Image (spheres, grey):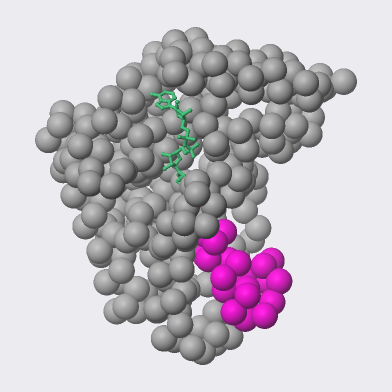
Amino acid sequence: MATKTPIHITVTGAAGQIGYALLFRIASGQLLGPDQPVVLRLLEIEPGMKALEGVIMELDDCAFPLLAGVEGTTDLKTAFDGSSWAMLVGSIPRKAGMERGDLLQINGGIFKPQGEAINAHASSDIRVLVVGNPCNTNCLIARSNAPDVPAERWFAMTRLDQNRAQTQLAKKAGVSVDAVTNIAVWGNHSATQFPDFGNTLIGGKPATDVITDRAWLEGDFLTTIQQRGAKIIEARGASSAASAANAAIDSVNSVWRETPAGDFASLAVVSNGEYGVPEGLQFGFPVSSDGAGNWRVVEGLAHDAFSAERIRLTTEELLGEREDVRALGLVP
Ligand code: NAX
């Protein structure tokens, strides 16, 4: 029997498709380890509560030894009370014909109160991963409304893009995925993101030495990663869920597990001006962790003119989103 004190984890949008792929993995120990009991606090909106009841019944029916408790709620205080990790999944993604300003306003209505509730009720060691899109700016909104939670405790998910890039590069090079390391996804989790093949290694060698087809790297490779989400919707009739949940688990692991020497992971974190990125943006960077929850942006990576331009474009997009949410009064 597990003897550690249970850690409270909040998952929002818990009755959605990512929630369904995520909760069972958390409860089975795949998020915080095989000896760490967890209590799940599941936040939904009223229309999702019926489905959430069913999900909770299924969690019960798994008899997970590590699941020390589970509560479904529509109340922000109950959801975040005493929580040490919050995974903010529920959001309103962009729909056809929706303007960026409308999208950000709707999400402001979700992430501002959630940030305030985290500030007021979460445990003092709270860490937050935002998955719900537009995840970088949703994270910025929540963080900006939680002034007592240090900025370095907030993360937005670019890991799915990293994992997608890893597999595409491995396939092209004809190697196994674990031979592909050092993949940084810069900037926004959107079509402007830049999966940085120029700093990636394959079998310890520069990816650009192993894959010499530069036109593929700058063309099909980038568009495959940038448009992968849309392709999955086209094929499956629903957006990525299991791979997104998997990336959410990888993201949390990249914070609390030690990063292998010489490698890094992609995570959108607060910018302190690294690589000339304006301070305060929630920006996809290469990140390394010491295994005790302390991470740093890996510095010193070089960018040629092509890569620098890609990073400039995604930075511009995030600056535009920040201007929009400032104009809406969602962030100072
Ligand atoms: P679903 O529509 O299946 O589920 C979302 C759930 O959130 C619903 O059950 C809904 O009732 C709930 N919800 C809505 N507003 C809420 C609120 N204010 N509080 C609590 N719950 C609320 O979406 P799903 O496929 O699970 O995707 C969730 C989010 O992840 C979307 O925004 C999606 O765009 C985003 N994604 C982010 C990815 C990333 O890499 N960062 C990749 C996958 C995914 O597209």
The part of the image, by quadrant, that contains residue 282 is top left
Q: Is residue 171 magenta?
A: yes
Image quadrant in which the C terminus is located: top left
Where is residue 177? Give x, y as percent. 67, 67
Q: Residue at x 51, y 12 (%)?
A: 73
The correct choice, above or below, for 160 with respect to 70 in the image is below
Q: Is residue 191 magenta?
A: no
The correct choice, above or below, for 63 with respect to 250 in the image is above
Quarter of the rendered structure image containing ligand 1: top left
Q: Residue at x 29, y 59 (%)?
A: 314
Provide the residue span drawn in magenta. Answer: 160-183
Where is residue 203? Give x, y as percent. 66, 77
As rendered, which of 170 and 303 lies closer to the eye? 170
Q: Farthest right residue?
A: 1
The correct choice, above or below, for 222 with respect to 238 in the image is below
The chief SS type of the magenta part is helix
Q: Farthest left residue?
A: 327
The part of the image, by quadrant, that contains residue 25 is top right
Q: Residue at x 75, y 32 (%)?
A: 28
Residue 41 in view of the camera: no
Where is residue 264? Give x, y as percent. 55, 59
Image quadrant in which the N terminus is located: top right
Number of numbered markers = 0
Q: Residue at x 57, y 20 (%)?
A: 52
As rendered, which of 83 and 64 lies closer to the eye? 64
Q: Position of 6 compared to 319: left or right?
A: right
As rendered, which of 222 and 98 lies closer to the eye? 98
Where is residue 112? Give x, y as percent. 30, 25
